[in-house]
């Protein structure tokens, strides 16, 4: 699995990842998964594109 930091956007995870939620639920993703790093997503931990709306820089 590779993680790419996209300029002014999410972390792009390429390959299989396992997400473990605070309640113990487990979700596996097989392909490209974008994880929010701006804090504005309404669908955390995933990116929903809101970084564009807030003008996230980073
Ligand atoms: S990085 Fe895309 S919504 Fe936060």
Image (cartoon, rainbow, N blue to C red):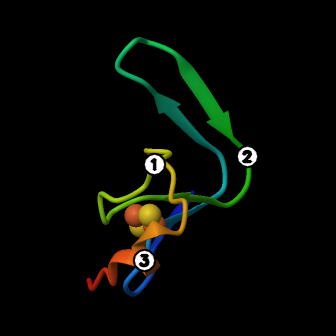
CA neighbours of label 3 inside 10 A, class few (<14), some (14 to 19), many (20+): few
CA neighbours of label 1 inside 10 A, class few (<14), some (14 to 19), many (20+): few
Residue 8, quarter of picture: bottom left
**48 w.r.t. 30: above or below:** below
The quadrant of the image that shows the C terminus is bottom left
Find the residue positioned furthest to the right. 30
Alpha-carbon span between mark 3 and mark 1: 12 Å
Find the residue positioned furthest to the front. 53
**21 w.r.t. 41: above or below:** above
In the structure shown, which secondary structural element does the residue marked by tag 1 occupy?
Answer: loop
The quadrant of the image that shows the N terminus is bottom right
Q: Is residue 48 left or right of residue 22?
A: right
Q: Is residue 9 left or right of residue 16?
A: left
Q: Is mark 2 within 8 Å of ligand 1?
A: no
Question: Which residue in the structure is indicated by mark 2?
Answer: 30
Query: Which residue is pictured at 60% across the width and 28% down the height?
Result: 27
In the structure shown, which secondary structural element does the residue marked by tag 3 occupy?
Answer: helix
In the structure shown, which secondary structural element does the residue marked by tag 2 occupy?
Answer: loop
Residue contact at pointers 3 and 1, CB within 8 angstroms:
no
Alpha-carbon span between mark 2 and mark 1: 22 Å
Q: Is residue 28 left or right of residue 38?
A: right
Question: Which residue in the structure is indicated by mark 1?
Answer: 42
Residue 47 spot, x, y in % from top left: 50, 59
- The mark that comes first in sequence, 3 or 2, is 2
- The mark that comes first in sequence, 2 or 1, is 2
Label tally: 3
Residue 6 spot, x, y in % from top left: 45, 81
- Residue depth check, mark 2 versus mark 1: number of the one nearer the observer: 1
Query: Which residue is pictured at 44% across the width and 45% down the height?
Result: 45
Question: Which residue in the structure is indicated by mark 3?
Answer: 53
Residue 24 spot, x, y in % from top left: 43, 12
């Amino acid at each position: 699995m590779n993680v790419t930091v996209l300029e002014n956007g999410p972390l792009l995870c390429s390959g299989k990842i396992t997400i473990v939620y605070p309640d113990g639920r487990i979700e596996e993703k097989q392909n490209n998964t974008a994880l929010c790093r701006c804090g504005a997503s309404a669908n955390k931990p995933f990116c929903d594109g809101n970084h564009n709306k807030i003008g996230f820089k980073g």
